Image (cartoon, helix red, strand yellow):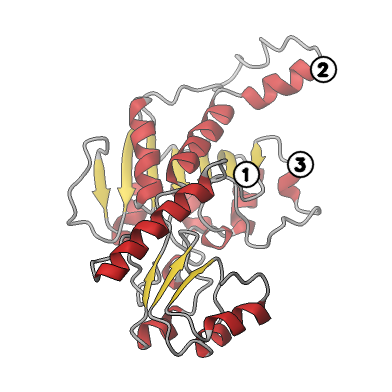
Amino acid sequence: MHAVTDAEAISAIESADVALASRLSSSMAEHAPRLRWVHSTAAAVGILPLNELAARGILVTNSRGIQAPAMAEFVIGGLLVLARRFHLMLAAQRERRWVQNELTRDVWPWSVLGRRMTIVGFGTTGQEVARRAHAFGMRVIGIRRRVNQPKPEFVDRIAGPGELDEVLQGCDVLVIAAPFIAETDGLIGSERLALLNPGAIVINVARGQIIDEAALIAALEKGHLGGAVLDVFRHEPLDPASVLWAMPNVIISPHVSGVRPDHWDEVIDLFSENLRRFQRGDPLLNPVDGHAGY
């Protein structure tokens, strides 16, 4: 059954063993006595009542990995725009101005070759970002909880969350690709932004709550940061009054870094494969740890 409203979902889920959901409320779960498995159409699962589902032994899977290549392309694209100052060139082009001297009289533009990138959240998206950054000759450090997993050849180092402050020192590009959980709420504040190299670029394709937005703005205004590429914000849509809109070294994207035409085809393909596994009693792809939150 297909439901498009909360009322329809509550009615339909009463007899459901499986739910394919972009959102599932506690009320919906309470009305689903037969529910055994929920598949999230997104990678993020914060919109699901994970604790309640885990307590009932209900399996949860997600669609992580499907958006990863597109998000990685977004990260590299945004980085190159700021590093090579394409945003200034495009503005000058619209005004028919030749800005050669303006673009070569200071430390910008800079090459990404040899620069150090730190990726906070080394899941499927973080790894795709690292793969592309490595191809550009960057030195890449990934932060992930499971540090005992094998280190990919395209990464210089894997570090744990407890080493975050250490690896932020000397960082030229900070990429946020971590899940939004209690431990990552406000993870990057003024003190950690200060650890980055002067002129560093911050890129967030995860959740706006992970970065202290006021601290980010302050670091941009003071000139400590060279720029930011932001696809997510603490409050969305971003307030038209936000000073971020007018900052010349900030690229604002309306939470679309993972969008591509065939996204839903792959979501359905993944769900279909898992449905076959579910019917056979085989392990499902992309299981979610309800206690960890991702």
Q: CA distance from mark 1 to mark 2?
A: 26 Å
Pick whichever of labels 1 and 2 is earlier in the sequence. 2
Residue drawn 54% across and 85% down?
A: 26
Residue picked out by circle 2 = 95
Query: Is residue 276 visible from the viewing direction of this image?
Result: yes
Judge the density around disc 3: few (<14), some (14-19), many (≥20) Cα neighbours within 10 Å: few
Residue drawn 44% across and 61% down?
A: 179
Query: In the displayed structure, would residue 55 be above or below residue 140?
Result: below
Which of these two is toward me, 224 or 109?
A: 109
Mark 2 or 3: in front is: 2
Q: Is residue 154 left or right of residue 150?
A: right
Q: For residue 246, which numbered disc appears in the image?
A: 3
Residue picked out by circle 1 = 220
Query: In the displayed structure, would residue 128 be above or below residue 46?
Result: above
Which of these two is toward me, 252 or 260?
A: 260
Amino acid at circle 2 = Glu
Q: CA distance from mark 2 to mark 3?
A: 18 Å
Judge the density around disc 2: few (<14), some (14-19), many (≥20) Cα neighbours within 10 Å: few
Work out which quarter of the rendered image holds the N terminus and state it: bottom right
Where residue 99 sits: x, y (%)? 71, 12
